[in-house]
Amino acid sequence: MPGKRSKRSDTERFACPDCENRLWRIGSEKYLIYCSEASDFVHYMGMSRRQAAMSMAQGYRLDRHSWIEEFFCGEHGKMWLLVRNLESGKIATTTATAHDWKRSTGTPNPDSSNPSVSEFTQRMSRSPQVF
């Protein structure tokens, strides 16, 4: 029985939201999401309103079932996606919004540039890379 212990078939495959081609993980950090309002607890974590109110009384809570991660599409280049583990065991992905960036931990916002980086370096980092 060859491949009996192989985990290759268990790896999750992600599709590009624009072209449906396969996305590749870059190996970047997983930026976890915080829930700060009761509505966030209900919407993103699937809690009841009562549980959300109790969690809200304790302060911020880290959602370990959703994070922002960087992926690569052969057609569109690098993109940031919000990845969620669903209760069914499947993984759902959506494009990360500005609201998701505000709720994440220690993430650099890709839409705004770093003021300590020169214009030339910024422009060269955004140009297509040939491997």
Image (cartoon, rainbow, N blue to C red):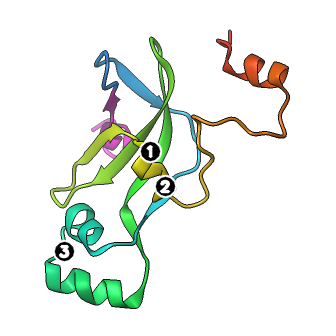
User: Which residue was labeled with disc 3?
Assistant: 47
Circles 2, 1 touching at the beta carbon (< 8 Å): yes
What separation in Å lies between label 2 and label 1 (alpha carbons)? 6 Å
Q: How far across and how far down the image is residue 80, in percent? A: 47, 36
Circles 3, 2 touching at the beta carbon (< 8 Å): no
User: Which residue was labeled with disc 2?
Assistant: 102
Q: How far across and how far down the image is residue 70, in percent? A: 51, 37
Residue 11 drawn in magenta: yes
Please tell me which residue lies in front, 99 or 79: 99
Please tell me which residue lies in front, 15 or 60: 60
Please tell me which residue lies in front, 15 or 123: 123
- Which range is magenta? 1-15
Q: Label 3: how many residues lie within 10 Å, few (<14), some (14-19) or many (20+)?
A: some
* Residue drawn at the location 24% of the way across and 69% of the way down: 39
What separation in Å lies between label 3 and label 2 (alpha carbons)? 21 Å
Q: How far across and how far down the image is residue 126, in percent? A: 67, 20
